[in-house]
Amino acid sequence: MVSSFVRQLAFLALPYLLGRAVQEVVADGRTDRLAWYVAVLATVVLVEFAGLCGWMMWSNLAEARLAAGLREDVLGVVLDTDDAALATRTDGYGDTLSRAVEDVDVVLVWVHGLATWVVIGTTVVVLVPSIAGIDPSLLLVALGCAALLLVVNLTLPPRFARRIGAFAQAQASRTRTVEELTSAYATLRGVGGEAALVRRHDARSADVTERIVAVARIRSLWAASGEAVPFAGIAVGLAVGGLAALDGRMDVGQLTTFTLWMGTVQLATNAIVARLGDFGAARVSAERITAVLELGRPRDSAGAPAPGAATDHAPSLALTGVAAAGAAPVTFTLSPGDWGLVTGPTGVGKSTLLRAVAGLSDHTGAIRWCGAEVGRIPVAERFEQIVLVPQAPLLLHGTVRDNLLLAADPSAGPPPSDARLREVCRTAAFDVVLEALPDGLDTVVGERGSTLSGGERQRLALARALLRDTPVLLLDDVTSALDEETEHLLLDRLRARTDDRVVLFAGHRPAVRSRADHVVELHPTEVVARG
């Protein structure tokens, strides 16, 4: 703020000094003053440059800090919120991504421009008395421009805010459609359904185009009004100032200063228009971001465990009266080395129960790890204790190495060695696949792992989870796409590597059931525990 104030004072001083130089050196013929004015103007330019550098540096720092903080907060809420709750505030994956990227960017533009209000305020405080001192009639011209701009800025911003809100919704809808198109295209192509997805994408793209044209129409009218009014003021001011100069009430230097200052008034006016536009867009985006941040579940400070509390008790995973997705309550305890299996008919809530154990889904009853309620363990610490491999794991467009290293903690030191990566791949029975890949760990797996089969994607996701090396491993039907031979190989290797871990499966594969120490059969109205 101080830097922008200093910069604007220097910027406003330049027209005054230049006007005096024109009057004394050119009009009055005092050429001996030329060197002095050149030195003073050069000094003021350097001061302005220094102020501008400070202004940009601090604005960029504030923008970067806010960007990191907002995106970290949004990501934390998304990771700590179950899908059902997230769906009440967002319109799917695409909309959530739009809030974390485009909406945050819009807010950052507004934050970056906050110091501009110091510039605008300085301009008003300096120019109002200065222009009045030259000629009161010129001040009336400036006030007339301000009145017209006030009318423009009272009528157009509400319309702009409505248009930008509609555009944001349309953009989020198209983003979701693109995500659906890229993820489901290969599947639907086999049954001839790709045309429907393309048509839906085209329709939503057309809606985005219509909305952005409406936004551009309002913004162009707004911006054009912001420039036309000051230009008209300059024309009127030159006419008034010219008559005053002819009457001897104003010298050439003052007329020069006024003309240059009116250019500054135009810049300030454009800045006001831009900042008000940024505010309208930022308010809409801030509301969309806030809708996600409000999903962050409040922690009861009296009942919340202190950092590290999850390791203060004997290690065990205990579920007491836990019910999720309408299934009957479940009660069981697993200790390190135990394999548990939650099984039952399709749709009974096996996957939801595992998500509840991971702290990602609402439930009744109590889920405790090492004596601490899982839902109250800080998110970062919980991720160090519990890892979930979903039935349909997410792989990113990149190499095998890239996808494995998603589980590595960059703050823990250098990344895992190739030997460590190959070790977890072997445990997950992915080593045979790895050997057959043309570039091994550096083989690109395509969008969402599209170059791999379903079973290969499951095994790569399991290897990634093993790299995390957490004491609790939650596996949601991770062998459902494997043949019997590969499944037995994977389970035997996994058993040998999890003597000190709690492993909880969800599924109904006989090979998993035969190896489980505890089996819990879920039914909508009853739970049968064995083992």
Image (spheres, rainbow, N blue to C red):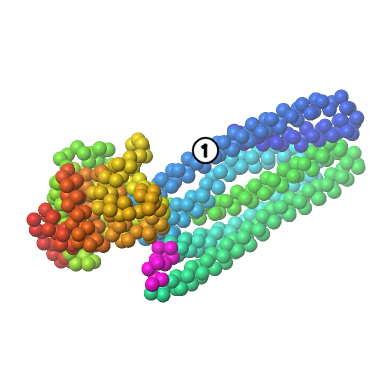
Which sits in the foreground, 309 or 23?
309
Residue at position x 89%, y 27% from top? 30
* Along the line of sight, the residue nearer the viewer: 284 or 312: 312
Above or below, 290 relative to 48: below
The image shows residue 251 at horizontal and vertical percentages of 86, 37
Provide the residue span drawn in magenta. Answer: 180-190
Count of labels shown?
Answer: 1
274 left or right of 296? right
Mark 1, secondary structure of its residue: helix
Q: Position of residue 490 (x, y in %)?
A: 21, 54
* Image location (x, y in percent) of residue 179: 43, 61
Say which residue label 1 marks. 61
Residue at 87 percent across and 30 percent down: it is 25
Is residue 184 inside the magenta stretch?
Answer: yes
**Which residue sits at x=22%, y=67%?**
346
Q: In the rendered view, would you say 315 is above or below 461?
A: above
**Residue nearest the viewer, comparing 373 with 432:** 432
Q: Residue 90's quadrant in the figure?
A: bottom left
- The three-letter code of the residue at mark 1 reads Leu
Q: Quadrant of residue 57?
A: top right
In this view, 413 is above or below 231: above
In percent of width and height, residue 377 lies at 26, 44
User: Residue pushed farthest left?
Assistant: 531
